[in-house]
Amino acid sequence: MHSAVDLIASLCSELPVEVYAGEGPDRRKLTTPGNLKDPSGEGQGLEDWAYQLVESWLLRGNAFGDILDGTVAQPRQVLLQHPDDVTGWIEDGTPVWNVRGRQVDAARWMHRRVMPVAGRVLGVSPIQFHASTVGLSITSVKFGESWFRDGAHPSALLTNEEASINEQQARDVKNRFLAALRGNREPVVMGKGWKYQAIQISPEESQFLATQGYTEAQCARMFGPGIAEVLGYESGGSLTYTNVESRSAHLLVLTINKWLRRLERALTALLPAPQYAVIPREGILQATTLDKYRAHESALRNRWKTVNEIRQGENLRPVPWGDKPNTAGTGAPQGKTGDTGDDTDNKEDGTP
């Protein structure tokens, strides 16, 4: 379960954050303000703050913090608190917050919840929502331990198929057999007709390990589809090149994206309107070099990116002719290589 939480929190906190204003053709990228680079003011940076925030959501369903600068409607700096130290309830229609026995000023208090429940001020975590699954995992582990350690069942049968024996003979045979087993590993000589059959159940046969593996996978899936498979739990299906290749996309769309959106809303709340935070998803997809070059080729061919825009994304220096849209079906536009002016050979619609 910790691995699932760490995976989601790490992915959300390690992706870059960009700040924009405007929409559509008026959208423009802005410089990231200082308070967003270090929302807590502790000097640990945005990544540390974002990890704490997402981890609190995943484990407790709520995130709390003291607003050090700004207001509830427009906080600028927030020091997050451990969710186990906070209690909250509704009193006369107003939320009341208590931190380690001390009531806090609601006007300087941030609360962000996930999986809200009608009529309650607190949200619930994926763990609380799937409490029965967690209970099954714990119960199966405890039962498995007691079975192998304290199980009230014989470990084997020692029978004689050719003779009838009385109680004293049975006791003597058992003692001789156990003495040989506990001694110096000498051969056991029992006479004619004796048969030994072990009935101590093995871990594999008992299915306790399989049950435990299943419930661990179920616990990982509480946080979203695809988490168990990424962490290596048995999923019951075979993996092929195709589904391994698309696993990152499935993880993003079905699981990580909702946590990224929640984090984007929390970060946007720290910005003055109409600015908003955007977390690019490309870092999760991590295309192969060949797939990336194919995407670049498609972007140039369909003229929705220029050569210099692609080169900038690859951390390459711009070229003199790279700001013009491609009109010749290749990376370089028509005309002379050093020509940077606007001429009729490079019209946007490609007409002569």
Image (cartoon, helix red, strand yellow):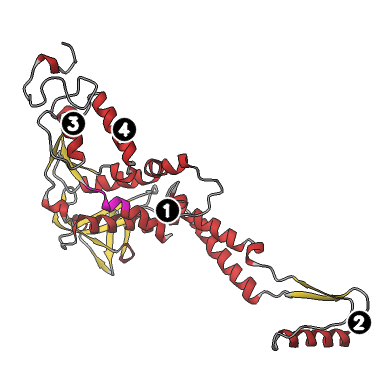
Please report the residue visible at 53 percent of the width from the left and 50 percent of the height from the top.
Answer: 235
Q: Quadrant of the N terminus?
A: bottom left
N-terminal of the pair, mark 2 or mark 1, is: 1
Per the rendered image, the range of residues in magenta is 11-16
Q: State the image quarter where residue 351 is shown.
A: top left
Residue bearing the label numbered 1: 126
Going by the numbered disc 4, the residue's amino acid type is Arg
Q: Nearer the viewer, mark 1 or mark 3?
A: 3
Residue found at the far left of this picture: 341
Mark 1 neighbour density, 10 Å: few (under 14) some (14–19) many (20 or more): many
Q: How many marks?
A: 4
Check if mark 2's residue and mark 1's residue have beta carbons within 8 Å. no
Is 313 on the left-hand or right-hand side of 215? left
Instruction: Determine the CA span between mark 4 and mark 1.
Output: 39 Å
Using the image as rendered, state which of residue 221 and residue 186 is in the foreground. 186
Return the x and y of residue 280 as percentages of the image width and height: 26, 42
Going by the numbered disc 1, the residue's amino acid type is Pro
Residue bearing the label numbered 4: 294
Mark 3 neighbour density, 10 Å: few (under 14) some (14–19) many (20 or more): many
Instruction: Determine the CA span between mark 2 and mark 3.
Output: 93 Å
Instruction: Determine the CA span between mark 3 and mark 4.
Output: 14 Å
Judge whether residue 22 is colored magenta: no
Residue bearing the label numbered 3: 307
N-terminal of the pair, mark 2 or mark 3, is: 2
